Image (cartoon, rainbow, N blue to C red):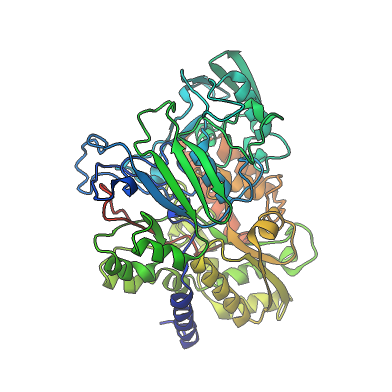
Amino acid sequence: MKENYWQRYWSLQRSRRRFLGGAAAVGAGAAGVVLVGCGSSSNSSKTPSGTSPAGSSTASGSATASGSSTASGNDPFKNAKPGGTFRSVTTGDPPTLHPYKNLSFTVKGFASYVYSRLMKYDTQWDKDPALLEPTGDLAEKVESNPDGTQWTVTLRDQIFFQDVAPVSGRALDMDDIKYSWSQMVSDISQNRSQVAFVDHLEYPDAKTVKFILKTPNAAFKDVLADANLFWVIPKEADGKVDIAKTPVGTGPWQMTNYTPSSSFSFAKHPKWYDAPRPYIDKIELAIMTSYAQRKAQFIAGNTDVSDLISDDLASVRDGRKGTQFTSITPQLMSFFYFDHVSQAQSPWQKDPRVRQAISQCIDRDSLDELAFEIEKVKKQGFDITVNWNNLIPAGMKRWWLDPKSSGQGDSAKYFKYDAKNAKALLEAAGAGGMSVKFQYPATIYGQVFDSVAQANIQFMQAIGINVQTDVQNYQSQYITQTFSGNFTGIAFGYETPFPEGGSYPIRFFTDNPLNHDQVKDQQLADLATKQQQELDPAKRKDLFNQIQQLNAEKMYYVPNQAGAGPAWTSYSPQMQGVTHIN
């Protein structure tokens, strides 16, 4: 039974959320939706039928599975009717359209329409997105030598850029690969540390790229498939075309219009290597920062998809008859991080007990109820399961360690809500009644995230911490400054949703620009490097467990519950073959 204080607080928060609306940014706008079927409609020009955006899978891991609702095993594309326009939404403008010049999920989401990677994820209607494996995108074949230190990538034939001047629909050549890799490892790419294990590339012939690694990497194919990393851009981007204004790639969609704060338009790339896909002709991507607007436009029939919060499932079901729903736990971790923990200045830098106390003051079960309304959703007839995030998010089933399990060991106690002990830990560390600046981004992630952030403030205040709140602009301050470690105090946000677990410890504990806390812990740095080199899956899983156990002991990063529950998406009744998954 929760304390009455928190019951009253959650009641107030729910009332406020119903008034404001809001959902996590892992809904329709960021999902890399896959649509199939042969649906018919009286308004055929506005009815989606086919795949969108084909060949793209964003790093969030929240791509919606699709196909026969009866999961018959038949080819869901067999009766697909080409044509039509898919009317989708996104939650905000990208800070740039250049895929290497910003870390924002909005940039990577945009890139997935226009550009290609060497690898992508094998998204299928009958596959659990948490268990997807890499497959070829521009690569026809990827082979390793016996010890995993050399990888040979053979490119497909007949790969063409979109018909946008000055590239003008020409064929891809090896100079495009060379230029793209130079951007991946340059100073403009804040993710360059993710490929630091690559020593150099060789180009034996016009179709072959050879990656020479410094050490073996168990996740090499996943790295090439990661939508945060290696996008193939034209060599003309080196001075002849500004792809931040005129994007041109080899992907399934060509951008035909962008009106900031309003919309994107895309037309299918007729010379995409996987033709006749995409099956639809156009995508209209409306930019709607307001969740209430996205929901209203969907109910009115003006869009074909919308993200939803749990509180609105029943009302949308009743408001637009025949609406179809999917839910999936995204591979998305929200977390507290701290400024420069390896510099002995502030309380959390000096003593891990302060960070342990902050974790113990968080009532994760109450956050789950606040964010996902578990009991209410169940009563309305929807299935729902929520786990706790660890340093590896709960949606990443391959490598996640359940904080509630015996495998977490003694450090499991720091995940459990214990306000009394949290306060005692602060006092023992000499930090009782401390003041701290607490910063998080406004609006971009949606009202669920904002509500959880505000609840976290209440938790810290309840153990005597004087919280000074700084709600930041995402584009101008949070993603450019705070997320890169340029801040003082405590920050709260989402980690970049990687498709493969090894990227989390590499980012968090090795020497790179996005080690948010600037952690210098040799044991964790060694484990991060070792897991990347371990080719045996069982041994690698054990290393991931050790990393999650050790982080929990020291709580350099405090996992939180935004992103740990289902991301709900609604689809128009005309769409065929939407599968409800949990």
Question: Residue 135 location in percent, x, y?
Answer: 43, 31
Residue 325, compared with residue 2, is above or below; it is: above
Q: Is residue 61 left or right of residue 239?
A: left
Q: Quadrant of the C terminus?
A: bottom left
Percent position of residue 216, x then y = 58, 29
Q: Indicate the position of residue 420 as horizontal and vertical percent values.
A: 57, 81
Q: Quadrant of the N terminus?
A: bottom left
For the question of whether residue 421 can be seen, the reply is no
Instruction: Estimate the x, y position of residue 13 in percent, counting from the top left.
Output: 48, 79
Would you say 263 lies left or right of 462 here?
left
Quarter of the rendering containing residue 298: bottom left
Tell me: residue 90, above or below residue 313: above
- For the point 51% across and 33% down, the residue is 116
Q: Nearer the viewer, residue 256 or 461?
A: 256
Quarter residue 370 falls in: bottom left
Of all residues, the one furthest to the top in this rendering is 205
Residue nearest the observer in this picture, 514 or 41: 41
> Which quadrant of the view contains residue 131?
top left
Residue 265 in view: yes
Picture mark count? 0
Q: Above or below — where is 405 with respect to 134?
A: below
Question: Of 203 and 29, which appears nearest the observer?
Answer: 29
Q: Residue at x 53, y 16 (%)?
A: 207
